[in-house]
Image (cartoon, rainbow, N blue to C red):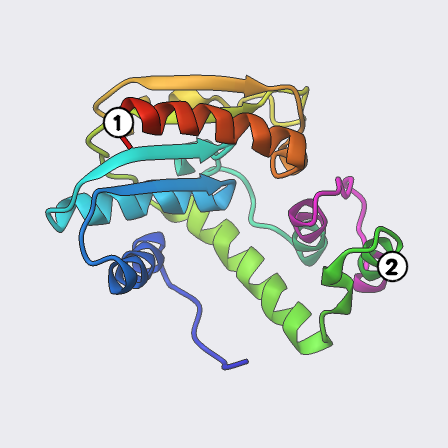
Amino acid sequence: MHDEPLPATMDEMAADYAAQIRSVRPHGPYRLLGWSVGGVIAHTVAVHLQRAGEQVDLLALMDAYPSDQWRELAGPTEADALNALLRMAGYEGGTGALTRDQVLATLRNEGSALAALPERVLTAVLGVVTNNARLMRTHRHQVYEGDLLFFTAAAPRPEGWLTPFAWLPYVTGRLVEHPLDCRHAEMTQPLQLDMVASVITSRLHALGT
């Protein structure tokens, strides 16, 4: 594992993503899908690709909300980052001040591969989570030229202010929402992914692919 500086901005991160994508597939059309922070990155990558003259004919976000909706919130503590790590693994961590040992014990009890992370790697992951939270609060979105396909985790949640329609200033086309009866952490479970895949498959067929 190499030590690399964390990106200073979301645009810097997205430019790296776009470069990595183009190293494998130099030209579009591109189809992008992202969950949570990954969805915000996907929107930013789509903008970068379009500004490079490339075609992006599908942008799909899974329960990912624009920076505007996070900007005024306080930055995360390590306990918040640890809870985020649990959510990344598909478990709701609650709001308590969890320690690393408690989080690792939970992951071990649930059989998660994340429990096997060495201390150095866990520290790096927490650093990424904290940095991503900072980027989410400081990023200024540009406009994506096209439609936005949005999958919402529609189960009740503490962040009642979140709405996919906050993306409307940052897309030129339609925003098509597909609510899923699950929590944010459950979006990547098999049942939800099957529903996401079904919708995206239909959309790709409509595009002629």
| Residue hosting label 1 | 207
In the foreground, 112 or 184: 112
Quarter-wise, where is residue 120 in the image?
bottom right
Q: Is residue 28 magenta?
A: no
Give how far apart the Cα atoms at labels 1 and 2 are.
46 Å
Q: Residue at x 48, y 45 (%)?
A: 37
Label at residue 84: none
Residue at horizontal 38 percent and vertical 25 percent from the top: 149
Q: Earlier in the sequence, mark 1 or mark 2?
A: 2
Disc 2 residue type? Ala
Residue drawn 50% across and 31% down?
197
Give left or right: position of 163 versus 204. right
Q: Circle 1 — which element?
A: loop
Q: Which of 46 and 81 is in front in this view?
A: 46
In the image, is residue 139 above or below residue 15? above
Circle 2 is placed at which residue position?
A: 105
Residue 61 lies in quadrant: top left
Nearest the camera: 30 or 128? 30
Q: What residue type is labelled 1?
A: Leu
Residues in magenta, as a range: 83-102
**Could you tell me which secondary element the residue under label 2 belongs to?**
helix
